[in-house]
Image (cartoon, rainbow, N blue to C red):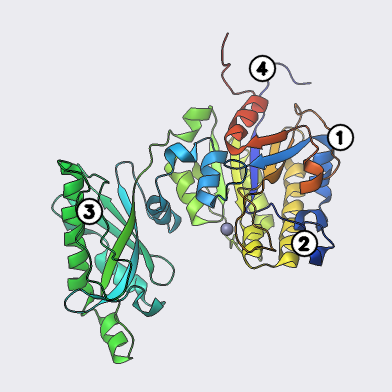
Amino acid sequence: MAAASDTFPALLLIADGLGDRAVPELGGQTPLEAARTPNLDHLAARGESGLLDPIAPGIRGGSDTGHLALLGYDPYRFYPGRGPFEAMGIGMEVRRGDLAFRCNFSTVDAELIVRDRRAGRISERTGELAAALDGLQIEDVEFRFKESIAHRAALVMRGPDLGIHVSDVDPHADGARIWEAHATAEGDAASAKTARLLNAFVRRTFDILDEHPVNVARRAAGLPPANIVLPRGIGASPDLAPFDAAHGVKSACIVEVGLVKGLGRYIGMNVIDVPGATAGLDTDTEAIGNAVVAALKEHNFILCNVKGPDVAGHDRNARGKVAIIEKIDAMVGQILRAHGDSLILMVTGDHSTPVTYGDHTGEPCPVLIWGPPVRCDRVDRFGETAASTGGVSRIRGLDVMNLLTSYMGVQEKYGA
Ligand SMILES: [Zn+2]
């Protein structure tokens, strides 16, 4: 019997891109409705269901903005633009005070006129080019640089007195000379410093990359050299309160994608890597489940994200989405067998990725909450249609941590 002082650990399980639409190939059901999910149905029958707008009704969110909201940070206040999350997402360390940019490897001629903004969509040996730039120091500012997918990369500027009000370097068109960055307001010395050093960095990337062996080989093969880096999308590292102190929990983050790992690391969660977690449909959900079970012994809040449903949604792969949801269901059963008598479990998505659309849409995700203190409604299975009649009704991502910390018994009272 639970006494008033009892607390429960909680698992927030995010099936990435879970929400979907009626799929003709599945007889008009959604992939979640078509999937065989005995464990999730069992929880829905004994807990409460509803619909969750990760950001707000109708908003097509990303995984970054969606997870910010689910973890209690209003994305409209705290989302710093894509630069910092792009950098976190490829495993770069982003610290408070840093500036971050998305970048392209591009091709310029000797007059710095852009000949190909994507350097022929270079896909090989960009790691060698990035290594030649990473760690450059100009005055008192350090430049950290890392390659991403294809011609993309990210840049982190770290040093004192940097401002973010800086114009673009990337002319966003072939045939134009690269632009000189400048501060966008008079008298903003910090942004003027950022602009001056950013221009110096860009010039330095040309000096280093133009005759780099990778580009010598590319020219010999008739390919455009990746001989400059063009940063854009400047963002300052966001001012996010450390997660555990904000919510009175001891948290772990067991997720597959770099973007969410980077966010977890940034807010101070204990980020646990799982060998076999591929972020694809072939991922080892049993290994992820084992990691969750183990982490629950040392932590009282776990964020777990399985990426597969979003991947299948982007690929318009209805059967694949059904199959990965069934694997997640088996993983839930595995976790319940280990911790089912004493756990608050919330299952939802960070946005909808319908297989009929192939990208994120603004529909809410189904959500279920289950655990010893959670009331029961009349919903008896987990799915979009059934959840729309449940006791949770319709909530936003920002409500999630309030609900969980209340059920967990760790939330401070608001008022007397
Ligand atoms: Zn997606």
Alpha-carbon neighbours of circle 4 within 10 Å: few (<14), some, or many (≥20)? few
- The Cα atoms of the two marked residues, 3 and 4, are separated by 50 Å
Q: Looking at the picture, which amino acid does disc 1 mark?
A: Arg
Decide which of 268, 55 is in the foreground and name it: 55
Q: Name the residue under label 3.
A: 142
Q: Looking at the picture, which amino acid does disc 3 mark?
A: Glu
Alpha-carbon neighbours of circle 1 within 10 Å: few (<14), some, or many (≥20)? some
Q: Position of residue 124 (x, y in %)?
A: 40, 78
Q: Element type at marker 4?
A: loop
When the figure is inspected, residue 245 is found, relative to residue 230, above or below; the finding is above
Q: Name the residue under label 4.
A: 5
Query: Would you say 106 lies left or right of 303 here?
Result: left
Q: Mark 1 points at which residue?
A: 378
Which residue is at the far top?
Answer: 416
**Looking at the rendering, in which quadrant would you find the N terminus?**
top right
Alpha-carbon neighbours of circle 3 within 10 Å: few (<14), some, or many (≥20)? some
Q: Where is residue 88 in the image (x, y as percent from the top left)?
A: 42, 53
- Callout 1–callout 3 Cβ contact below 8 Å: no
Can see residue 148? yes
- The Cα atoms of the two marked residues, 4 and 1, are separated by 29 Å
Q: Which of marks 3 and 2 is in front?
A: 2
User: Which image quarter: residue 126?
Assistant: bottom left
Decide which of 287, 128 is in the foreground and name it: 128
Query: Would you say 210 lies left or right of 128 here?
Result: left
Q: Element type at marker 2?
A: loop
Q: Looking at the picture, which amino acid does disc 2 mark?
A: Val
Q: Is mark 2 within 8 Å of ligand 1?
A: no
Q: Position of residue 128 (x, y in %)?
A: 32, 73
Looking at the rendering, the quadrant in which ligand 1 lies is bottom right
